[in-house]
Every structure is written in C-alpha cells, then in structure tokens.
Amino acid sequence: MKNNLLIIPCYNEEEVLLHTYEKIKDLYNELIAKKVLDPKSKICFVDDGSKDKTWEIIMNLSDQEPMVQGIKLSRNFGHQAALIAGLETKFGKFDTYISIDADLQDDITVIGKMISEAENGMSIVYGVRDERKSDSFFKRSTAKSFYNLMGFLGADTVYNHADFRLIDNNALRELLRFQERNLFLRGIVPMVGFNNSVVSYNRTKREYGTTKYPLKKMLAFAWEGITSLSFKPLHLILYIGIVMFAISCVILVWATVVLLMGRVIPGWFSVIFPSTFFGGIQMLSIGVIGEYIGKIYNEVKSRPRYIVEREL
Ligand code: UDP
Ligand code: MG
C-alpha cells in the first residue's frame, strides 16, 4: 500500500476549498477502506499568496482534520512554483505525490487508478483529458493551438495532459534536480523518464469560483513553455536570415543587370521597401533573441523559485 500526498495549489480559491476537501476526504476514506491507499496519506494545500480567505480556510482545516497539511507561500509565485514548492517541501515523506487543481475539474475518481498504476511499478502516471466539452470553445481552441504550436516548435509535451499527475518519490528526487526558474513542469517531467503510463478522464466544468488563468496568464504560460523547452525559435531566425540573404543577393544581381542595360534603377520603392522589410525582420529576430537572453538572465540570478512563509 502506498501512502500518497495530494498537492493542491490554491490561488484565491475560497469558494471551492471546502467542497474540494469534502470530495477528496470521501474519496480518500473510500480508497483507504478498499486498502488501495495507506491511511497515512495526506492532503497538502499550497496557498500561492491568495488575497482572500484561502489561508484561513486551510488553517482551520488543518486544525480540525489530521489529513490536512498546508503550505503558505509569502506571495503569489504562480501555479508552477506552487506545485514545486509543495513537492520539494514534502520530498522524502511520502511514496507518491499527486498534483491536482483546486477546482477539481480533473476527475478525482481516477486517483485510485493512478495509485494502482504506481503499485504496478509506474513512477509517473499522467492524467490525460479525453475530451474538453466542458471548457469554452475559446479555451478549447486556444489550448489546442497551444499544443500544436508547442509540437511544431519542438517542445515535447504529453498531449492534453495538464498538471494532474502522480509522481513517486524516486522520480521526484530526479525532478528536483532540474533547477530551472523558467519552470514548465509538464514539459520537464517527461524528461525525467522512468516507467510511466497514462490514465484518461473527462474534464468537467469549474463548479465554484472563476478561472485563475485569464488569457494574459495563459499566453505568458505558453511562452514560458516554448522558451523553456525549445530552441527552435532561434533556429527559425537562422533560416529566415538565410532566405533573406538569398533574396537580397537576387535583388543585387537584378539591380546590376538593370544598371548594365543602361536603364534607371526604379524609384524609391526599391529603397524604402527593402529597408523597412529587412529592418522589421531584424527587429523581430533581435526581439526573440532578447527573450532568450532575458530567460538566461533569470536563470543565472538563481533566485528562489518560491518562498515558504509557514508550514502547518
Ligand atoms: N493557481 C495558483 N497560482 C496562480 C494561478 C493559479 O496556484 O497564480 C492555481 C489555481 O488555484 C488552481 C490551479 O492553479 O488550483 C489552476 O488554475 P485554474 O483552475 O484557474 O486554471 P484553468 O483550469 O482555468 O486553466
Ligand atoms: Mg481549472
């Protein structure tokens, strides 16, 4: 029997926490009764600098319920940092760790399956969404384009897997050696390797509260993923550069021929167009390189990825 820690990042989740806890408690009790789960299993809420009553609720729960643990980050560090904070703080204390969002849009009934998979020797078990009927059309299509773009740019991720996954203590030890600040867990977990498998489920609607991933955060997250996993944007710049150089050679030859034939070089278009065009391409390329330099800057500073203020 495995003892499992469920890690739940929470940012302004006061509306959902109690519902979430009740559902998980029922599931845990059921799994413990069925002897799938060790009774020493726990639930750890990581408060990612919430501005509402999230932390008060976590404190009350941990006072009353022996199953509940809590970690409070000193400010909002973001979803990924909250997850790694939970994993790193609790490393070595459990056999397996399962991360899941506070709104329980991911089907908790597959947790039993995940643990059975771990029992069968899987170190990592990915939760994969079968379909996303419950998400809005906008969310669905942006998420799909995101996976496609990531794939095109050479960043390998498990399709339709978010951060609902099981990882055992051995794989976690290795995951924690990935010391990047530009953290995109669903991209680096597959790099850890070990035996792994997939369980699929249907994702449901968020029942309480609202999404903590507005479009702006989603785009930032997508960019984080691409830049943390792939150098392809840099390669693309090289290809564009080569093509542009070839085109400019052709233009040069053409201009020379026109000149030798004694005709006048056509007017301002031939000057203005290339200069703005190439200028634009160059600015864009420098911008992309700048993005990477920004990331390197962040990495070399080695700032803490999160700061724990209190642990319950
Ligand atoms: N979250 C977090 N920090 C943040 C944003 C989100 O810890 O800065 C948590 C949030 O509380 C939730 C999970 O990350 O448990 C996923 O967020 P949400 O369900 O709002 O995202 P969506 O399902 O809409 O993509
Ligand atoms: Mg959600």
Image (cartoon, rainbow, N blue to C red):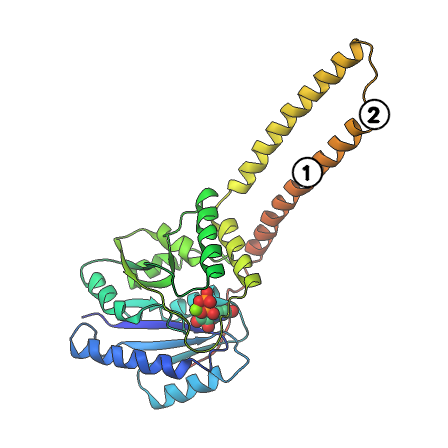
Q: Residues within 10 Å of mark 2 (few under 14, many from 20)?
A: few
> Which callout, 2 or 1, points at the residue further toward the start of the chain?
2
Q: Residues within 10 Å of mark 1 (few under 14, many from 20)?
A: some
> Are discs 2 and 1 less than 8 Å apart at CB?
no
x, y percentage for residue 82?
A: 46, 69
Tell me the mark number nearer the camera, choosing from 2 and 1.
2
Q: Is mark 2 within 8 Å of ligand 1?
A: no
Query: Position of 119 compared to 240: left or right?
Result: left
Instruction: Return the x and y of residue 307 as percentages of the image width and height.
Output: 51, 71
Q: Is mark 1 within 8 Å of ligand 1?
A: no
Q: Is residue 225 left or right of residue 64?
A: right
Residue assigned mark 2: 267
The image shows residue 257 at horizontal and vertical percentages of 74, 12
Question: Which element is circle 2 on?
Answer: loop
Q: Quadrant of the C terminus?
A: bottom left
How far is the residue under mark 2 from the one under mark 1? 24 Å
Q: Is residue 179 visible?
A: no
Residue 26 sits in which quadrant? bottom left
In front here: 49 or 203?
203
Q: Residue at x 31, y 79 (%)?
A: 23
Q: Which residue type carries mark 1?
A: Gln
Q: Position of residue 9 (x, y in %)?
A: 43, 72
In the orientation shown, which residue stands out farthest toward the left? Answer: 34
Task: Identify the image quadrant of the N terminus.
Answer: bottom left
Q: Residue at x 51, y 42 (%)?
A: 231
Q: Amino acid at mark 2?
A: Gly
Height in image: 294 above or below 139?
Answer: above
Q: Is residue 152 above or below residue 115?
A: above
Residue matched to label 1: 282
